Amino acid sequence: MKSFDVLRVGIVLFALGVISLSLLSIFAPTISYTGLASGAFTLCLNNPPQIELTHCQTSLTQYNYYVCRLGIVDPDVHDSHEWFIDPLTTNSSFLNITSEGVLVGQPGLHQDGVHVYDLFLQDDSGCANAQTRKRFVLNVTRVNNAPVFVPPLGPFELEEGETLRGISLSDNFFDPDGDPLTFSHSIPSSNFLISIENDELVITAASCGETSLVVSATDPGGLSADSDIFTIDAPCPQASSIPSAGGGGGGPPCVPDWQCGQWEQCLPNGTQVRYCEDVNRCKDDLFEMWRECTYVSHCYDGIQNFDEEGIDCGGENCPPCATCDDGIRNCHTMPDGSILCETGVDCGGPCDPCDHCNDGIQNFDEEGIDCGGENCPPCATCYDGIQNCHTMPDGSILCEEGVDCGGPCPACDLLQVPSPLQPDADWFIAWVAAFLIGFSGIVFALYKYKQKIRAFFVKLRFLLSKKHAKTILFTAVQRDMLLNNIDDLESRNLFKKNRKIDFEEYQEELAAILRKFYAILVGQSFNLKEVKTGLKEYKLHTFPAHILEKQYVQLLRLEKSSVFSRDELELFTEFLRLNILGFSPLRKYVRKDGLVKSVSGDTYEVVVKSLYNAIIALQFKQFSQAKKLYLQVLESYDQLSSPEQVELFGAVHLTFDEIRYHISYRE
């Protein structure tokens, strides 16, 4: 072959290669991701922070001190954060939050019961999604304190036949909790009649004589207190007597002279005592005098006093002081009254620095470099439903190009792969890009027919779908149970008239049904990696395997994302219903009329509603209508912004697989 012919063939082959690259760059839908946005507009690129409540107790006993450090999950590791708390019940004002995200407080009197708070976490990005909210419910168990007797009660003296009234037992008994008290008494001798009317003690001397009595007070919880034993005396008349010849007695009677000391410290039960002594020695015993007082707890006054070992901690009555060697990850009250919390167990904050989570080494209980384990943030994985970056074993960082794909993960599907013309492309791609400028006329002409060409290939893939038997994964009983769960969820929420829909509650319950769906297939404890492994045991065709894996990513989004719109939640619901029917024995499933949505709103809403209508069409075996709707979705999908395409990518691909699966199997 002549050198000229070789050169000509080379030029032709090179031109064909360039045209192929042009077609690939035109007809492969692209998505811009964080860090790749370009053009005449700007995007506020921010991952919203998440509040972690896993380690916080949700129950507490009244009067105990509550401390819990909240966790932060934020892929944007350099963001600063600010905390807010909003009590939603009137008796919840005791719990506060520090600037470090530590919940602290002590429920006092009448602050038992359920306390509801909204916790807010805001980063400094300035984006619309900079703030997140988390509902926190704390149940405070009431402590019942026994009633307290305040002496003295009695002694009483009255005449035979006399009735003594006006003795209020409320002056001698009180309940620290403010509960109403009921009173009772012991059985006196037959000489006296005793009754209690409300809190009034009534004594009647039926005849002369003497008796002893004890009065008891009982609160609604069954705790009681008894009074001291006191005497009641009705003297009998004395017979006259003749003095003895000796005359005189034994000297003048001894008159007690009581001298009392200072009132002692007020006790936690609200009483205080002082002791009195007879200086004339007529009485040898000390006399105790009690009175009510207001107890001020010293364990939360911000001062190291009484027998405390630190500020408001230690000693006999206060909670133990936090130390750097107690084996507990807790918070310390510093000498200036500020609170510093450990960042690990007995390390960080007021203690020695922790040796991990920021040292660039996989150590302690970490599952990766500075991630995983009890104290470090979770490691990024290729099956966590989040587009994030991974720290590699050599310390380098690789980021996913899509949700759980690209970069350190398996390659993304065609629809999710970014354009090959990236700013970091090598010299060869840059040279090819420069050469493509010469073919701009051809590219422009082909671009006009992009939609038609892509639609042609989609139709071709539908047409070439191989016929195979329907995959059965659920029994008829399991199928009906799951369908009934969905029907019950919808009837209690979406289809109930005159009821304000709680979309957050609906989303949580829908995720729970999806969890049950996968629990039947692969067991109770699972993640995406375990789901893929479990599904391999069924030896599924390609379509069923892809459908079940992509639907599990929807479950992760339901559990980890903020609240979706009604249209999106209904779409997720119909995906689940379709897959229950698609992997179960045949059943004639009758649905309500009027299920198809009117396609209106902005482009995002149009795509969601069109996908919903396509899934409904599949449920009624209207395959042609489903394919037609999917092609319309592709046209609208190109008009979405890059973040919107990322949001809907999974639903669009799942719909494509659903159509191919349902038109290919034989009932």
Image: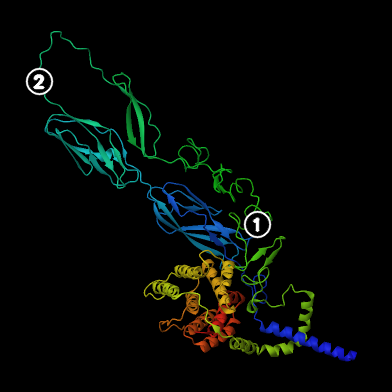
Q: Amino acid at mark 2?
A: Ala
Residue 239: assigned label: 2
Residue 546: assigned label: none
Circle 2 packing at 10 Å, graded few (<14), some (14-19), many (20+), is: few
Percent position of residue 577, x then y: 47, 77
**Local SS, label 1:** loop
Q: Amino acid at mark 1?
A: Asp
Along the viewing direction, whichever of 300 and 561 lies nearer the viewer: 561
Residue 370: assigned label: 1
Dots 2, 1 in contact, CB < 8 A? no
Percent position of residue 12, x then y: 80, 89
Residue at 51% across, 60% down: 120
Residue 589 in the figure: left or right of residue 367: left
Q: CA distance from mark 2 to mark 1?
A: 99 Å
Percent position of residue 609, x then y: 50, 81
Q: Is residue 657 above or below residue 145?
A: below
Among all residues in the image, which is located at the extreme top? 246
Of the two numbered discs 2 and 1 in the rendering, the one whose residue sits closer to the viewer:
1
Percent position of residue 273, x then y: 36, 32
Q: Residue 454: which quarter of the image? A: bottom right
